[in-house]
Image (cartoon, rainbow, N blue to C red):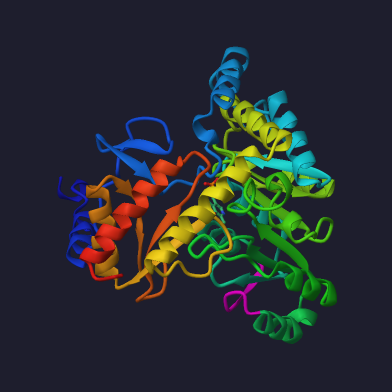
């Protein structure tokens, strides 16, 4: 039957190929670590969000194994029915202590958390004001909500204030949403000013700290801690999938948020709870962060070392304030060529080009981790130098 051949998809895929954006998913044949076996080739991994190297840490893995032995492989249902295993509550208590907030509600991922939380906390008659560079999962959450939307230019506080001035009085709740750390450039939200404006105009604040948790602030408590804003941000989102090294997402807030979400957040009501292995592994990771700053110190040492070496070679590493290290190449084609040459030389850095970033600002986004050794970083820098000279970038 002709209509089972999905020719409409075949045509779209042909178009991807014509546009030069077709790709196959790379395969990692082992754990996520400093060195990985990508497509059967050993390469230095400068592309993961495993900031602290916890994804393959023996303590974290053991916690997962123990939990499987005690609780099984799957939670068996959504949390509102019978999937709410006691360790999920334990994880939420540990996270609330970590984030210094009243209560935490966990979700199956950061994306689920944004989609479920935004949709549940605002409604028709409310306004969401969102930074133009916010993460896709925020944009999806905003789309699913019935609130009106306004977008402010990236980190432009005057534009944000203009919108508040013009629109505040027409709405019940106004929710300002921003990433804590913007993942393409590694810059921080201007959180102190956002909070000030929110207080002045009686608006709520929502910070997605996926790239800040485990990285910034005391023991990696995140951007809210970094800026000493505890108690002044209403909804703080974190992920368990990046620095924590596992999978999952959460919102830290007042206990009323948690109660309301348990009645209204659709990923909690309609999608099965976190599996026990992930829950227990995340508990262990967060405990490790609270016990010592060893991993976050190593992360920052590595990031400073790597950035300064690339800078000395003459590369443009942008204005990152975090271990995210973009190397701005400019042209889309050259960026992809650079990335491919590095991979041939044993260094995996993904090239990021339009439409993920503006045209002409193609970059190699280097993700530094505490798991990297100085030798890994030296080798990566040496390959950047070779390819940079070959392509006339430096
Ligand atoms: C990665 C990311 C997410 C999604 O987190 P997952 O746990 O991977 O679903 C959400 N928000 C931001 C800002 C992110 O960077």
In this rendering, does residue 111 appear at all? no
In this rendering, does residue 237 appear at all? yes
Residue 148 in magenta stretch: yes
**Quadrant location, the C terminus:** bottom left
Q: Quadrant of residue 156?
A: bottom right
**Magenta stretch, residue numbers:** 147-156
In the displayed image of the protein, which residue is found farthest to the left? Answer: 2
Q: Quadrant of residue 258?
A: top right
Position in image of residue 188 (x %, y %)? 62, 65
Q: Quadrant of residue 138?
A: bottom right
As rendered, which of 68 and 97 lies closer to the eye? 97
Looking at the image, which residue is at 40% across and 42% down? Answer: 375
Looking at the image, which residue is at 75% across and 34% down? Answer: 94
Position in image of residue 321 (x %, y %)? 58, 63
Side of 105 relative to 27 (left or right): right
Looking at the image, which residue is at 60% across and 28% down? Answer: 281
Side of 300 relative to 13 (left or right): right
């Amino acid at each position: 039957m002709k209509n089972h051949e999905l020719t409409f998809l075949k045509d779209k895929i042909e178009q991807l190929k014509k546009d030069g954006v077709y790709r196959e998913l790379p395969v990692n044949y082992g754990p996520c670590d400093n060195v990985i076996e990508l497509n059967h080739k050993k390469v230095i991994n400068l592309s993961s969000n495993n900031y602290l190297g916890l994804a393959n840490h023996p303590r974290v893995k053991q916690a997962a194994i123990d939990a499987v032995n005690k609780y099984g492989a799957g939670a068996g249902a959504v949390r509102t029915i019978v999937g709410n295993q006691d360790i999920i509550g334990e994880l939420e208590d540990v996270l609330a202590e970590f984030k210094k907030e009243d209560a935490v509600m966990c979700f199956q991922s950061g994306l689920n958390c944004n989609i479920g939380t935004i949709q549940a906390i605002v409604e028709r008659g409310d306004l969401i004001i969102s930074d133009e560079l916010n993460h896709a999962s925020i944009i999806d959450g905003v789309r699913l909500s019935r609130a009106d939307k306004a977008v402010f230019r990236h980190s432009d506080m005057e534009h944000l204030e203009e919108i508040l001035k013009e629109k505040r009085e027409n709405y019940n709740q106004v929710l300002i949403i921003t990433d804590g750390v913007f993942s393409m450039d590694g810059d921080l939200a201007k959180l102190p000013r956002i909070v000030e404006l929110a207080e002045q105009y009686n608006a709520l604040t929502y910070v997605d700290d996926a790239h800040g948790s485990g990285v910034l602030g005391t023991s990696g408590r995140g951007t809210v801690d970094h800026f000493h804003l505890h108690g002044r941000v209403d909804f703080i989102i974190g992920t368990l999938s990046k620095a924590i090294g596992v999978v999952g997402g959460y919102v830290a807030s007042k206990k009323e948020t948690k109660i309301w979400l348990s009645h209204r957040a659709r990923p909690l009501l309609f999608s099965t709870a976190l599996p026990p292995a992930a829950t227990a592994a995340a508990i262990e990771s967060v405990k490790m962060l609270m016990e010592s700053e060893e991993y976050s110190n190593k992360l920052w040492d590595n990031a400073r070392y790597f950035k300064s070496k690339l800078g000395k070679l003459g590369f443009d590493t942008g204005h990152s304030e975090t271990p995210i290290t973009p190397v701005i190449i400019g042209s889309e084609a050259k960026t992809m060529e650079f990335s491919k040459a590095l991979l041939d030389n044993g260094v995996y850095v993904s090239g990021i080009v339009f439409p993920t970033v503006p045209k002409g600002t193609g970059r190699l986004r280097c993700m530094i981790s505490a798991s990297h050794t100085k030798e890994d970083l030296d080798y990566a820098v040496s390959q950047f130098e070779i390819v940079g000279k070959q392509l006339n970038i430096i």
